[in-house]
Image: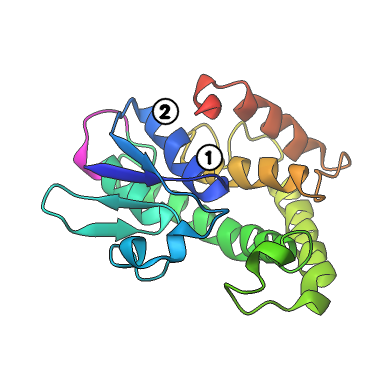
Amino acid sequence: MLFYDSVGPNPQVVRVFMAERGIELPKTTIDLRAGENRQPAYMAKNPAGQMPCLELDDGSVIAEITVICEYLDETTPGLSLIGANAQERAETRMWVRRIDLGIIEPLANGFRFSQGLKLFQNRIHCIPQAADDLKATAQEKLTWLNGQMDGKTWICGNRFTLADIFLYCFLKFGAAVGQPLNPDNTNITAWFDRVAARPSTAA
């Protein structure tokens, strides 16, 4: 297999996931800032033009970070970061979806439509006037999640999962692009520090 890597929080999710699982794959780096991901050679592999993707041994390509992580989780030995049974997997996927739709999508688009506008305005349809509201939506959902984290070590209770990796990578990115953690959300800030202390987050 070959992992197509780049800068940004999306590829980092997969790198941290692989580090947690002890998975090592050959990588090639795509120059996202220069728009290499929108050139024909890469688009032939991932027509969505997004990063990252995973090329399998038979030449087929898997994209979308949660899908890549689930594929690796299912096809490599070791402790699952999705779940050991149907109930655990359902819980992880529930939180991943809530985090994705409620926090990550508005956070990322808030960036793309404001600080990242110069990079993205010729690549996707941008709505600059929506940026502040999207950022506010992400913060509102984080405050809601803060309440859900009472008494929990990780998002799925005592299980460290893809949900933790997913949220951590994007909150770290958000803090670097003008969307810092609200210190009033003490459960989230304590959780963030616990994740940051894991060696895998250096990936």
Whether residue 50 appears in this view of the structure is no
Position of residue 72 relative to residue 123, above or below, is above
The secondary element bearing badge 2 is classed as: helix
On the picture, is 183 further left or further right than 102?
A: right
Residue range in magenta is: 74-79
Which numbered marker is on residue 20? 2
Nearest the viewer among 13 and 38 is 38
Please identify the dominant SS of the magenta region: loop
Residue 104 percent location from the top left of the image: 63, 58
Position of residue 111 relative to residue 55, above or below, is below
Residue 154 percent location from the top left of the image: 58, 35
Whether residue 165 appears in this view of the structure is yes
On the picture, is 81 further left or further right than 155?
A: left
Nearest the viewer among 71 and 79 is 71
* The image quarter in which residue 141 lies: bottom right
Q: Residues within 10 Å of mark 1 (few under 14, many from 20)?
A: many
Residue 138 percent location from the top left of the image: 74, 60
Residue shown at 61% from the left, 31% from the top: 153
Dividing the image into 4 quarters, which one contains the N terminus?
top left
Say which residue label 1 marks. Answer: 165
Circles 1 and 2, Cβ within 8 Å, touching? The answer is yes
Amino acid type indicated by mark 1: Ile
Amino acid type indicated by mark 2: Glu
Nearest the viewer among 105 and 162 is 105
